[in-house]
Image (cartoon, grey):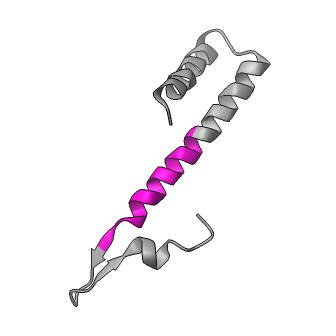
């Protein structure tokens, strides 16, 4: 996610706490938060998919290949 969009999220959060938001700003804030959460989840999933675990017998298992195809992310 772009830094400018994250800065806008922070601006809206600060304004919400001090002055309050208009309905349009509330809708924008909700949309930006959804985009941020989606980007966060995608980044976390890619990190988890690249983790390798060495078993006791010395074999290395990639968790992304083993568990990455599940539909409930």
> What segment carries the magenta color?
36-52
Camera-nearest residue between 24 and 46: 46
Q: 43 left or right of 31?
A: left
Report the residue that reaches farthest toward the bottom.
Answer: 57
| Residue at the (58%, 47%) spot, across then down | 38
Residue 32 appears in which quarter of the rendering?
Answer: top right
| Residue at the (46%, 51%) spot, across then down | 43
Report the residue that reaches farthest toward the right.
Answer: 23
Q: Is residue 6 above or below residue 36?
A: above
Q: Is residue 70 above or below residue 55?
A: above
Report the residue that reaches farthest toward the top.
Answer: 19
Q: Position of residue 47 (x, y in %)?
A: 39, 58
| Residue at the (60%, 11%) spot, across then down | 18
Q: 36 left or right of 43?
A: right
Q: Is residue 37 magenta?
A: yes
Residue 73 appears in which quarter of the rendering?
Answer: bottom right
Q: Position of residue 4 (x, y in %)?
A: 50, 24
Name the magenta segment's main secondary structure: helix
Q: Is residue 25 magenta?
A: no
Q: Position of residue 20 (x, y in %)?
A: 68, 13
Q: 53 left or right of 4?
A: left
Q: Is residue 30 above or below residue 22?
A: below
| Residue at the (61%, 35%) spot, across then down | 33
Q: Is residue 7 above or below residue 68?
A: above
Number of dots carrying numbers: 0
């Amino acid at each position: 996610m772009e830094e400018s969009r994250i800065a806008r999220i922070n601006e809206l959060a600060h304004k919400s706490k001090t002055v309050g938001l208009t309905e349009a700003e509330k809708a924008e804030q909700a949309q930006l938060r959804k985009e941020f959460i989606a980007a966060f989840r995608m980044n976390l999933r890619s990190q988890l998919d690249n983790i390798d675990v060495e078993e006791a017998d010395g074999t290395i298992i990639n968790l992304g290949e083993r568990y990455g195809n599940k539909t409930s992310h």
